[in-house]
């Protein structure tokens, strides 16, 4: 640990991706053995699904590390060239899904064969088994014995399967396999059966199933080769089918674990999808797990093995931010995945370090909050650029609005843009409706929906908004980037803001000042009584908590201002009371309009605001000395 270095200068929560964390030597030391990791390690789950940044690659890399899977692990990560080769692979006589599954099975079989040739001598003695010798001969005959890129293996395999010219002499078969006249698909399938039987025979002859852990084939980063076209669907579907074949064909001596992005997996639609439910595991993170992750990474960088939560969240970071405990503030504003937490914490650290501070202050956290929110809004559009390319335009519907949006208001905002978006994104036109927009924005975690007494955000398994669920909340992560810090788009009350300047009237102009004092007091009483009636009406209103609290706070400002103005007048200070009354009336009218735009036009509180606004205008414009007060009904 550097002598004299401040905590902030030493603090670092890691890289944005598992590959760089592994290269830095950080991943192994701070990796959390979560439920998803334990299930993948045991083999009970072989299909690990998660959103971008949820930790799929971290689990994959840890399984392949020396202290991960106890047996041999092979990592397969296709790049663009490999992806193009698989997408182009077709076989006459079989579907695209089946064809892609055959080329994946070839890749897995060759990896297993290469493993067995290296493994047999090291783990099972010097005498070569006949089955292993056959595999070695096959690899040499088909130019698969050397170290090659995945693309090269795919290219050779595709050529051999399509033309039925794989050399299978090592297994006692001549080219053609006696299938003259059969389709390409039938010939390719038969060639693979011979190769896989040869691999299975070697596993059996060596006794691998009983003597050591299985060979583990890890497939990650499929998103690098994914597009929305049918061939990409077939590529992933074929991969799923081929992974099933590994387990069944090799009798537990080898298994395959796949790591897929949730947005890719959820678009798949194939006949055997129901056969994968028991293999699926969707990664989810609790706040407790994310807090442990933050603590372990901070402890590693500060070189304080016994770092306590109190020290991290009370000394290195401020204990409270905006009246919230720091961990709650953090996890409320980040999507529940490691990458978001790491980036947010590093942004806080960077803000403090740039100032030369030894510790992170509340202001540093506020500064990082806006930057992090800007990042995440952009990242969300990029994450779903393939499946929902219109997202960035939908986000504009929420720019500089309140973070609570009622269904009618959402429909009203969307309608002027509907036709243009449906034309610009014609392939997605059927889903570009007000209901479709709500479902998409909920599914990606941008919007939450109120269910009962809480707001629910989607993390992969929640059902979409249902009929009657009409209140949507922008996730706190994205509110600073959109400027939506209040519950609704609600201008604050100010006695100096009046909707029309022609209503202003200076004290002493055109009337008897001696009569004006009693009238001014009566006008201020009218404002106070109007606020009190509205607050009583608000108590009976059906507004949700966030909106209710904000309306109550603003009405409280109007009431306090009226009372304060009376105190000022008692001190002999001249005040333009008419301006205050018109400002209150204008504010009530604006508030009613804003609630109406949020779909609350028929709420009694909305109508009462309009009534009180009109009554105050009548009172302010009444004849000098007249009784222009509004009614006193409760």
Image (cartoon, rainbow, N blue to C red):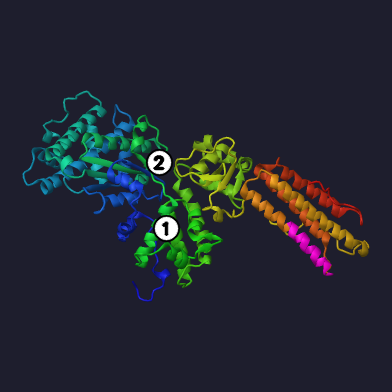
Could you say where residue 345 lies in the image, as x and y percent from the top left? 44, 61
**In the shown orientation, is residue 517 left or right of residue 279?**
right
**In the shown orientation, is residue 508 left or right of residue 407?**
right
The answer to whether residue 143 is seen in the rendering is no
Quick one: SS at disc 1? helix
Magenta residues (range) = 558-572
C-alpha gap between disc 2 and disc 1: 24 Å
Could you say where residue 503 lies in the image, as x and y percent from the top left? 83, 56
Front position among marks 2 and 1: 1
Q: Residues within 10 Å of mark 1 (few under 14, many from 20)?
A: many
Quick one: SS at disc 2? helix
Q: Main secondary structure of the magenta part?
A: helix
The tally of labels here is 2
Could you say where residue 289 lies in the image, as x and y percent from the top left? 40, 53
Q: What residue is pinned by disc 1? A: 342
Residue drawn at 33 percent across, 50 percent down: 59
Q: Is residue 179 above or below residue 368?
A: above
Residue drawn at 25 percent across, 37 percent down: 247
């Amino acid at each position: 640990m550097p002598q004299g270095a401040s905590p902030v200068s030493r603090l670092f929560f890691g890289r944005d991706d598992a590959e760089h964390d592994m290269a830095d030597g950080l991943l192994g030391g701070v990796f959390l053995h979560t439920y998803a990791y334990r299930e993948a390690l045991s083999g009970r789950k072989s299909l690990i699904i998660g959103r971008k940044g949820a930790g799929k690659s971290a689990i994959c890399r840890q399984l392949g590390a020396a202290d991960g899977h106890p047996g041999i692990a092979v990592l397969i990560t296709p790049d663009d060239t490999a992806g193009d080769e698989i997408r182009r692979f077709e076989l006459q006589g079989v579907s695209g899904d089946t064809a892609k599954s055959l080329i994946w099975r070839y890749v897995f079989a060759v990896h297993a064969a290469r493993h067995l040739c290296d493994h047999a001598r090291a783990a099972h003695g010097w005498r070569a088994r006949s089955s292993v010798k056959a595999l070695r001969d096959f690899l040499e005959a088909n130019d698969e014995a050397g170290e090659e890129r995945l693309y090269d293996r795919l290219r050779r395999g595709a050529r051999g399967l399509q033309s039925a010219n794989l050399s299978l002499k090592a297994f006692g078969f001549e080219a053609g396999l006696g299938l003259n006249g059969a389709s390409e698909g039938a010939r390719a399938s038969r060639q693979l059966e011979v190769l896989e039987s040869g691999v299975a025979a070697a596993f059996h002859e060596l006794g691998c199933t009983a003597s050591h852990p299985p060979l583990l084939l890890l497939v990650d980063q499929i998103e690098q080769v994914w597009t929305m076209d049918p061939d990409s669907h077939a590529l992933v579907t074929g991969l799923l089918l081929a992974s099933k074949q590994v387990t069944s064909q090799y009798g537990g001596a080898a298994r395959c674990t796949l790591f897929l992005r949730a947005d890719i997996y959820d678009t798949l639609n194939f006949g055997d999808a129901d056969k994968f439910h028991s293999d699926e595991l969707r990664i989810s993170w609790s706040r407790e797990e994310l807090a442990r992750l933050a603590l372990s990474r901070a402890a590693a960088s500060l070189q304080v093995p016994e770092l306590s939560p109190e020290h991290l969240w009370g000394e290195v970071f401020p204990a409270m931010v905006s009246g919230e405990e720091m961990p709650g503030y953090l996890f409320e504003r980040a999507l529940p995945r490691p990458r978001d937490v790491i980036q947010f914490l590093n942004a806080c650290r960077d803000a403090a370090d740039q100032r030369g501070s030894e510790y992170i202050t509340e202001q540093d956290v506020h500064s990082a909050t806006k930057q992090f929110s800007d990042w995440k809004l952009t990242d969300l559009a990029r994450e779903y650029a393939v499946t929902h390319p219109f997202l960035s335009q939908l986000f504009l519907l929420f720019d500089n609005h309140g973070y609570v949006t009622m269904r009618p208001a959402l429909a009203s905002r969307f309608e002027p843009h509907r036709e243009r978006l449906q034309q610009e994104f014609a392939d997605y036109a059927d889903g570009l409706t007000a209901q479709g927009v709500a479902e998409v924005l909920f599914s990606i975690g941008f919007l939450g929906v109120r269910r009962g007494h809480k707001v629910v955000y989607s993390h992969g398994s929640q059902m979409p908004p249902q009929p009657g669920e009409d209140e949507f909340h922008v996730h706190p992560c994205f509110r600073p980037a959109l400027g939506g810090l209040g519950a609704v788009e609600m201008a604050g009350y100010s006695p100096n803001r009046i909707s029309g300047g022609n209503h202003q009237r200076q004290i002493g102009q055109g009337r008897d000042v001696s009569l004006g004092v009693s009238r001014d007091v009566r006008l201020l009483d009218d404002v106070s009584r109007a606020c009190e009636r509205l607050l009583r009406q608000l108590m009976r209103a059906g507004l949700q908590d966030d909106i209710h609290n904000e309306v109550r706070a603003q009405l409280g400002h109007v009431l306090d201002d009226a009372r304060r103005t009376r105190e000022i007048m008692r001190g002999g200070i001249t005040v333009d009371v008419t301006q205050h009354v018109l400002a209150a009336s204008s504010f009530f009218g604006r508030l009613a309009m804003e609630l109406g735009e949020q779909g609350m036009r028929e709420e009694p509180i909305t109508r009462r605001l309009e009534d009180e606004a009109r009554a105050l205008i009548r009172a302010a414009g009444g004849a000098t000395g007249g009784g222009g007060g509004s009614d006193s009904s409760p």
